[in-house]
């Protein structure tokens, strides 16, 4: 910033130290008027001092032209005005110089010292001139009135420009502070908008992943059982009509259950879209980006929490047994109710593990273990090697390879531990431990 408090703009519009042409024109005009004033006053000064008139005129022109430097060196301008005060010239330069000095960023003690010097100089000159005029008879006033006249004149020449300069300088600094705050606020708003967009993108990505996981859990198990039952139905259709009818009924039940769960999932998605629309309409433009996605995720997550629970685990195992799997369920510890999300995750882990057995180890004996502990719940699904290798391929069960990944994500989101891998006997084991309270 310059000494007058004006900001240096990057691309200057004016010459030399001026930031704008308008400022340069104003200072040059003031300097011209001041030089003309000092030149005219220099005529009387040269006569009083016994100097040639051109000398006084040139001296006045040079002294008055110093006002052009008021923005660059305000102290020098004020000192010049004080120096020429005894010659009774430079009144405009003194007033404008004091104003510029008071409006600058200089320390207050320097401004006060120079203003005091100007006041004292003006007081002495006025007092001496008034006393000389009284002695010569040019002034018809009382001698006691001279100090009052001197103080009034000195105050009138120094106080108004200094006070006005202080006010303008304070106002300029306030405006600059407000401008900086506005710029800072604009930068913060831009940063918040970027972060809101990032959060919205992250929320959309998380929601897509969660929906894909839910759809996989809903469809894969039911459809896998339907395929197994359909294969059994095809095998016994002619040999055992009663068993074929039973298998057909099971396929129908599985299909209806799959459709019911799909309808529930689609209903959740539609309600989530409605929440997004309402949020986007009522929220501010900046907050709508992030808020809409967050509302959508929370709404879908709350509705999705009304999913299966551990009380339905026995029915899940029974469905796999009805499909021909030799499966045994064992429960350890005191049965109790957990948080909805914990029970749903435990159910989905067992469901996906049984689905994988149907896909990759059809006919293999499977053990499902559930342990209720003091601060956690543990589950394990382990199957023996299939009696006939390739049995899963025979019924045409495809695999996308996302089941284990989805289980690990579910358990990890609750602060649990998930482990899966082949056993030494040639089978496969899926184990998970979930804290009783959500982390």
Image (cartoon, rainbow, N blue to C red):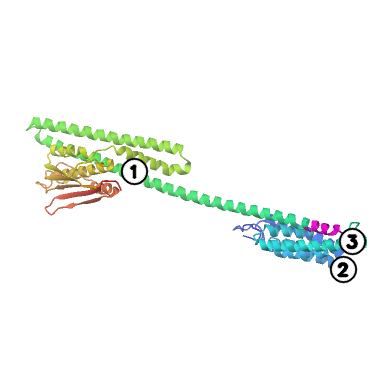
Q: Which x, y percent locates residue 38? A: 81, 62
Q: Is residue 151 magenta?
A: yes
Report if residue 393 is visible in the image. Answer: no
Q: Is residue 365 magenta?
A: no
Q: Are marks 1 and 3 in contact (CB under 8 Å)?
A: no
Residue that label 2 marks: 49
Residue nearer the viewer, 404 or 81: 81
Mark 2 or 3 closer to N-term? 2
Marker disc for residue 207: 1
Label 3 crowd (10 A; few <14 / some 14-19 / many >=20):
some
With 92 as the anchor, is 418 left or right in this view?
A: left
Whole-Å distance between the Cαs marked 1 and 3? 95 Å
Q: Residue furthest bottom?
A: 51
Q: Secondary structure at mark 1?
A: helix
Q: Which x, y percent locates residue 98? A: 72, 59
Residue that label 3 marks: 133
Mark 2 or 1 closer to N-term? 2
Instruction: Choose mark 1 or mark 3, whichever is in front.
Output: 3
Mark 1 or 3 closer to N-term? 3
Report if residue 316 is visible in the image. Answer: yes
Residue in the image at 52% along x and 50% along y? 185
Q: Which residues are magenta?
A: 143-154
Whole-Å distance between the Cαs marked 2 and 3? 17 Å
């Amino acid at each position: 910033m310059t000494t007058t408090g004006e900001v240096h703009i990057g691309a200057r519009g004016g010459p030399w130290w001026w930031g704008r042409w308008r400022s340069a024109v104003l200072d040059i005009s003031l300097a011209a008027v001041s030089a003309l004033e000092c030149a005219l006053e220099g005529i009387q000064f040269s006569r009083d001092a016994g100097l040639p008139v051109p000398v006084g005129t040139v001296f006045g022109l040079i002294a008055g032209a110093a006002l052009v430097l008021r923005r660059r060196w305000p102290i020098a301008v004020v000192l010049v005005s004080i120096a020429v005060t005894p010659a009774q010239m430079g009144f405009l330069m003194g007033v404008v110089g004091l104003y510029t000095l008071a409006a600058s960023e200089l320390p207050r003690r320097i401004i006060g010292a120079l203003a005091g010097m100007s006041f004292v100089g003006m007081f002495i000159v006025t007092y001496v001139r008034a006393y000389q005029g009284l002695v010569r008879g040019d002034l018809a006033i009382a001698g006691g009135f001279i100090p009052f006249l001197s103080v009034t004149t000195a105050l009138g020449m120094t106080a108004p420009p200094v006070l006005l300069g202080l006010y303008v300088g304070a106002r300029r600094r306030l405006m600059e502070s407000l401008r900086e705050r506005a710029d800072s606020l604009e930068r913060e708003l831009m940063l918040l908008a970027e972060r809101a967009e990032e959060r919205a993108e992250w929320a959309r990505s998380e929601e897509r992943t969660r929906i894909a996981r839910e759809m996989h859990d809903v469809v894969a198990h039911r459809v896998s059982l339907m395929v197994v039952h359909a294969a059994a139905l095809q095998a016994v259709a002619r040999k055992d009509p009663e068993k074929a009818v039973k298998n057909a009924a099971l396929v129908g039940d599985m299909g209806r259950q799959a459709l019911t769960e799909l309808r529930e999932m689609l209903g959740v998605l539609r309600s989530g879209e409605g929440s997004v629309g309402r949020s986007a309409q009522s929220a501010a433009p900046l907050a709508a980006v992030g808020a809409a996605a967050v509302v959508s995720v929370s709404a879908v997550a709350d509705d999705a929490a009304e999913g299966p629970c551990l009380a339905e685990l026995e029915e899940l195992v029974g469905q796999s047994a009805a499909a021909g799997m030799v499966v045994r369920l064992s429960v350890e510890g005191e049965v109790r109710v957990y948080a909805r999300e914990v029970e749903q995750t435990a159910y989905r882990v067992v469901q996906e593990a049984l689905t994988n057995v149907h896909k990759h180890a059809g006919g293999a004996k499977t053990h499902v273990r559930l342990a209720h502990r003091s601060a956690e719940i543990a589950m394990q699904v382990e199957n023996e090697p299939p009696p006939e290798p390739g049995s899963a391929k025979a019924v045409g069960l495809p695999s996308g390879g996302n089941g284990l990944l989805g289980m690990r994500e579910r358990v990890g989101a609750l602060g649990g531990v998930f482990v899966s891998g082949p056993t030494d006997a040639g089978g496969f084991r899926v184990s998970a431990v979930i804290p009783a309270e959500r982390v």
